[in-house]
Image: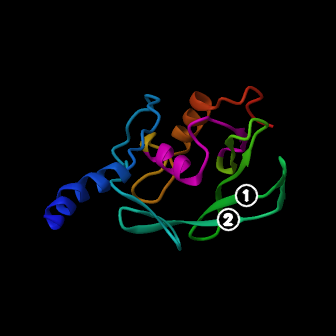
Amino acid sequence: MRILVILLFAPMMVFSQEKTYQTMRLGIPETGKEPNSIEFAKEGIVIDEKLCFRYELKHDVFTEYGKSRNYYEITSLDGKLVFSGIIYKNEKREWEGMVSFPLIDKKGYKNSKIISRKDLILNLSSSQVINNDCTINLDNLKLFYEMSNENKEKSF
């Protein structure tokens, strides 16, 4: 009887632990290059089973936003900075993120749905910015920035 109970409840426990992640739908034109799979591995970001980007988390770094306890950089495999961001708690003690997009010379991106690197990468890939061949669609990155930036100051 004990085994039957475990077998009946085990699938429910697994199901309840799964998290569904909903990305933003901005209506950016499709390119046909949307990744089929994204993994966040120790060595970096893997897209369709290919290592595409490196990820580094740094602590207590001085940035254009001030001192940050949680600063990250996402670089291409040849070391070029693609995205950088900070993760911090606001005055209400809620987590927020601020992202810079050096490829289009934009800083100060904020969106309540994008706090972590995972949030950023999943939303960029679903918005046709990160392609399945490890490239960045700069036109769609500009559209993404303009359409979803909640920061009233936009770029600073």
Q: Residue furthest front?
A: 1
Secondary structure of the residue carrying tag 1 is: loop
Q: Residue drawn 65% across and 50% down?
A: 103
Residue for badge 2: 57
Q: Residue drawn 67% across and 65% down?
A: 57
* Marked residue nearer the N-terminal end (1 or 2): 2
Please give the label number shown on residue 124: none
**Nearer to us in this view, 3 or 118:** 3
Q: Does the magenta stretch include residue 146?
A: no
Q: Which residue lies furthest to the top in this view?
A: 152
Instruction: Give the x, y percent position of residue 142.
Output: 59, 37
Query: What's under tag 2, amino acid-wise?
Result: Leu
Query: What's under tag 1, amino acid-wise?
Result: Asn
Residue for badge 1: 70
Instruction: Give the x, y percent position of residue 83.
Output: 64, 53
Whether label 1 touches label 2, CB < 8 Å: yes
Display coloring:
rainbow
The magenta-colored residue range is: 104-125
Residue 53, quarter of the rendered image: bottom right
Which of the image's four quarters has the N terminus? bottom left
Compared to residue 22, the image places residue 151 above or below, namely above
Q: Does the magenta stretch include residue 117?
A: yes
